[in-house]
């Protein structure tokens, strides 16, 4: 699947993979095509013409190892990953694995309904958006019966179902791209199950093929800043690490941004546990109990409480004065906030915490370089789900 990087203008909190891309780096590494563009880049970057030529030559050398310094790291604002369900699902590729017929489809239907309506899921805050549910082992009548059993006639136009789709690398990629173009507010795509979208061949269950299929879904999720949750099965054999029970190779778990492992002691039991792991995400164990009438899973308890970040005084001070939009230099911002911090240090702090500023205070942060120097723009974004 060939996917181009799509940059987002809203910076949202980082919880996912370590390959986030820099807005600033992208804009400053574009090769100029005219004399005026070259002069503008030289003036804006502070480089000499010879330094710029050397940098451009390095960028086109396939054997050059590109590195950045720690200083450059903190001077850059990176695109980060939004939460879909706080503490549970974030933008990226996730796997929900469990034995057949233990209630995985009811659980993902429940997740889909809550994201599409914006209602809290148990104790977790939900960020509302359109949901696409690929129920590839069902038909529409079965889906209708399931959703009626769970929620009656309390329907929503933001939850879309499909019972047939192409394979990864053979039609599905284009189908998902078309859906995203028509539904730009999509936050979650559910694939039920993985086996239905993978091409079967001689390498079907190799580490490389497992890594590739999740890698393709991850690439799509990263491009659109959404969550792709794929339902998969576990093996019957016991394992030392419970996540080793996921069917296939460790390539699935290694590439995914997060995994949810659903288990029951007995298939007929109403109780189940879900082990949750993820990149830069707190590990959890959820204890669930199913309502026998509605088949809805209810949260009984969690193994540990979610960690809450303590308030950040800088972010609190920014939120206190931004009521619409503000722009100015780092020095002007420091004077406005009345903080004992050098302008460059303040900029680095905001670069690193731009996602948190957006998630906790709905303030979008931009840091750009102009002829006059660095400019910071702070915008209050209303009506965030």
Image (cartoon, grey):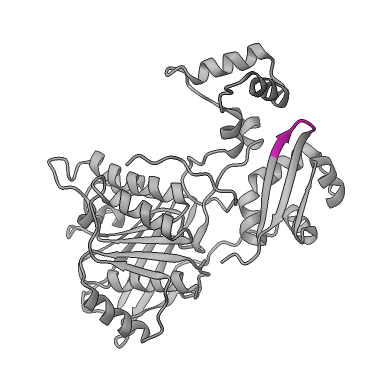
Viewer-side residue, 300 vs 333: 333
Residue numbers of the magenta segment: 368-372
From the viewer's side, name the closer residue of 349 and 61: 61
Instruction: Tell me if residue 354 is in the magenta stretch.
Output: no
Q: Position of residue 181 (x, y in %)?
A: 42, 55
Q: In the image, what residue occupies the spot 59% across and 49% down?
A: 9
Q: Which residue does the image show at 61% across and 36% down from the upper left?
A: 24
* Of 21 and 324, the residue lying toward us: 324
Magenta segment, principal secondary structure? strand
Residue at 26%, 48% (x, y): give it.
168
Q: Residue furthest top?
A: 50
275 left or right of 265? right
- Is the residue 371 above or below the residue 198 in the image? above
* Count of marks placed on residues: 0
Left or right? Give the position of 136 relative to 29.
left
Q: Is residue 193 left or right of residue 287?
A: left
Question: Residue at the left extreme?
Answer: 202
> Residue 81, image x and y in percent?
51, 51
**Taking the image as drawn, is residue 227 in sight?**
no
- Residue 369, magenta (yes or no): yes
Look at the image and tell me in which quarter the N terminus lies.
top left
In this rendered view, identify the residue nearer to me: 294 or 375: 375
Residue 175 spot, x, y in % from top left: 31, 54
Image quadrant assignment for residue 72:
top right
Residue 114 is at least partly visible in this image: yes
- Quadrant of the frame with the C terminus: bottom right
Q: Position of residue 31 (x, y in %)?
A: 56, 24
Vertical side of 44 occupied by 302: above or below? below
């Amino acid at each position: 699947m060939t996917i181009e990087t799509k940059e987002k203008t809203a910076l949202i909190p980082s919880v996912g993979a370590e390959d986030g891309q820099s807005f600033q780096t992208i804009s400053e590494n574009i090769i100029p095509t005219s004399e005026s563009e070259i002069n503008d880049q030289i003036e804006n970057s502070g480089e000499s013409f010879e330094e710029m030529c050397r940098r451009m030559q390095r960028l086109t050398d396939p054997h050059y190892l590109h590195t950045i310094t720690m200083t450059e790291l903190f001077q850059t604002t990176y695109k980060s990953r939004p939460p879909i369900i706080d503490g549970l699902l974030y933008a990226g590729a996730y796997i929900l694995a469990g034995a057949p017929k233990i209630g995985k489809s009811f659980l993902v239907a429940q997740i889909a309904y809550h994201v599409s309506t914006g209602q809290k899921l148990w104790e977790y805050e939900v960020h509302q958006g359109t949901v696409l549910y690929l129920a590839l082992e069902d038909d529409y009548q079965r889906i209708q019966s399931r959703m009626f059993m769970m929620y009656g006639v309390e329907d929503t136009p933001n939850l879309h179902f499909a019972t047939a789709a192409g394979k990864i690398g053979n039609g599905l990629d284009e189908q998902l791209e078309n859906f995203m173009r028509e539904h730009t507010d999509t936050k979650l795509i559910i694939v039920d199950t993985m086996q239905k979208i993978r091409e079967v061949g001689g390498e079907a269950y190799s580490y490389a093929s497992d890594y590739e299929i999740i890698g393709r879904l991850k690439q799509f999720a990263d491009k659109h800043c959404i969550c792709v949750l794929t339902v998969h099965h576990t093996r019957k054999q016991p394992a030392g690490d419970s996540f080793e029970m996921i069917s296939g190779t460790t390539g699935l778990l290694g590439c995914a941004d997060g995994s949810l492992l659903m288990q029951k002691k007995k298939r007929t039991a109403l109780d189940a546990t879900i082990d949750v792991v993820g990149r830069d995400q707190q590990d959890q164990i959820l204890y669930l109990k199913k309502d026998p009438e509605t088949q809805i899973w209810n949260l009984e308890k969690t193994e540990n409480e979610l960690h809450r970040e303590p308030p950040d005084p800088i972010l609190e001070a920014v939120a206190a004065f931004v009521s619409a939009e503000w722009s100015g230099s780092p020095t002007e911002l420091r004077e406005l906030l009345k903080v004992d911090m050098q302008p460059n240090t303040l900029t680095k702090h905001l670069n690193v915490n731009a996602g948190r500023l957006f998630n906790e205070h709905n303030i979008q942060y931009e840091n750009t370089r102009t002829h006059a120097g660095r400019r910071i723009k702070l915008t209050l974004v209303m009506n965030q789900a």
